[in-house]
Image (spheres, coloured by chain):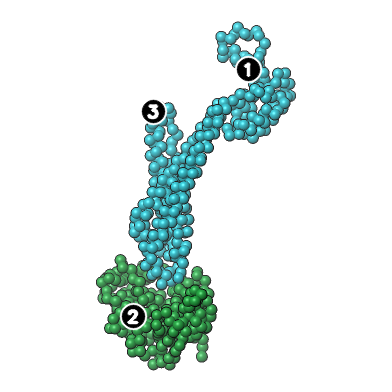
Amino acid sequence: MGEPYISYEGVEVCFTEFVYGLRDATVSFERGEFAFLVGKTGAGKSTLIKLLTREATPTKGKVTLAGRDITHLPDRLVPALRRSMGIVPQDFALLPRKRVWENVAYAMRAVGKSKKEVRQLVPQILEQVRIGHRADAFPHELSGGEQQRVAIGRALINNPPLLLADEPTGNLDPDHSWEIMELLKELNTKGTTVLVASHDMVVVEKMAKRIVKMEGGRVVSDTGKEMSNA
Amino acid sequence: MLDRIFFLLGEAFIALRRNGWMTFAAISTVAVSLFLLGGLGYVYLQVANAAQNMTGRFELRVMLKDGSKNFEISKTAADIRAIPGVKTVNWIPRDKAWQKFLTENPEHQKYVDIENPYPDSFKVILSDLKQTDQVIAKIKSFPAVSADEIQYLKSEQNLYVQIQAIVKWLGTALGGLLFVTGGILIYNAIRLSVLSRRLEIRNMQLVGASFLTIRIPFYIEGMVQGFVGGLLATLLLRAGHAVVDARVTQIWTTLPVFPTTTFLGILCAMGSVYGLICSMVAVRAPLRFR
C-alpha cells in the first residue's frame, strides 16, 4: 500500500501553555476519500483542517499532503499550497457587494486567471454547483444553502484535488444541509478528496462515510476507510 | 499582463474610494508637509543663492604692514588663496589706492602732495560666507598682514548666515513634523483600507492569491496618496510664489521664475516613495497568512 494522501503523525497544536488544539493526533486519509471529522466544539476538528490550509502550525508531530511535508512550510509557499485545495469556510465569506458570478470571478482574477478564462469558466463552475440560475443575484438575496453553493463554487476555481469544508452545514436547515452534502458527495465521486468537519451527526450518519471522531484534541475513534468507499 | 495591472489598479482605487475621508486627510497632510518642506527649501536655496551672488559686496579688505616687500606680498597672496572659502585675491598697490581715492574724491585734491597714507592691501572675495570668521583668523596669522586692519561687513554677512540657518531649522522642524504626521495618516488610511477590505483579503487568501496580488493594491493606494499630496504641494507652492511675486514686484524687484517642473518631479517622487514606504509598513502585520 502506498503513502497516504493526507497524514497526521503525533500532531500537537499548543495555543498557550494549557490550551491545546490537538494532542498526539494520528490519522491519515487516502486520495479520493470522503471523510467526516466530528466532535464537540473545541474537539480539534477545525484545527486538523487548519493544519492543512496552514492557518495553524503544529508544535509537535508531522503533517504531510500528497507526500510533501507541510509541517513547517514557509509562508511564501502558502499561496501555492492553497491553490492545490479548495477551502469552504463555515461563514461562506462571500462579498456582499458582488453578484454570485462576480464572487467567483473575483476569486479567479485574484489567482491570476485572465478575463477570457473567467468568462469561460465561471458559468461552468456555477452550473457544477447548481447555482447558475442565480448568477446575477447578490448574496443577501440567496438562501443559506445557495450561499454555501457559491462558497463551494469559489473553492473549485483551481480545480482542486482536495476539498476542505469546515462546518459547511453549520448555518443551514436540514434540507439545505442535505443538498450541500449531496453536492460534496457528487464532487467526491468525480475524484475529489473531501474532508468535512461537522457536528451535525444526523447528516453525517445519513451520508454513511468514514467518520473520525475527536475529543479533547485526540482522535478517539475512526470508522475506517472501507466505510468511506461504501 | 495588462489584464493583471488593471485588476490590481482597480483594487487599489476601490480602496481609495471606500475610505474617502481618511484618504483626504492623508493626502492633505502630506500636501501641507511637502508644501512646507518644498517652500522652505525653495526659500533656503534663494537666500543661499542671493548670498552667493552678493559675496562680491561682502569683500574683505586686508591691509599689509608698512614696508612689506614684493616677495612678502606675493607669498601672502598665495597663502590667502590657499585658504578654503576664498574665491579671489586681488592686490591693490598703495599708490593705486591713493590715486583712486583722489580721483573718486576730487575735493581732497589739495592733499595730493602729502605722503600717501594708504598701505598695500588685498581685496579678498569669499566663496562661502559661513567661513568668514575662519578665513579672517587665518589671514591675521600671516606675518605681513596688519592684524587690526581687516575690514568687512560683519553684521550683514552674519544676517545672511542667520537667515539661512532659521529657514533651514524651520524647514526641518515644521516640515519634518508634518511629514511624519502625514506618514502616520497614510499608515492609518491603509490600515482602515485593510479593515474595510478584509472580506476581499480573506477571499484572496482562501483561494491562494499570491502575497503580491494581495499587497500591491495597498502599495498603489499609499503611492497615490503620496503622489497626489506632492502634486497639491507643487500647485500650492506655484500659487504662493505667484502671490508673493506680485507683492514683491510692486515694492522691490521681480522674483526668479518658479521651477514648477522641477518641484513637480521632486515633490511627487518624494510623496510616492514615502506613501509606498508607509503602506509597506502598514500592511506587514495585518496581511500575514493565517
Residue that numbered label 3 is attached to:
B250
Question: Residue A10: x, y in percent?
Answer: 52, 83
Give the mark nearer the N terminus: 3 vs 1: 1
Read off the residue under disc 2: A169
Which chain wears cyan?
A: B
Residue toward you, B10 or A152 = A152
- Secondary structure under tag 1 reads helix
Q: Nearer the viewer, mark 2 or mark 1?
A: 2
Q: Disc 3 versus disc 1: distance between alpha carbons? A: 40 Å
Give the labeled residue for mark 1. Answer: B97
- Tell me the kind of residue under disc 3: Gln
Does the image show residue B194? yes
Note whether residue B58 is visible.
no
**Which amino acid type is marked by label 1?**
Ala
Q: Nearer the viewer, mark 3 or mark 2?
A: 2
Write down which chain is painted green.
A
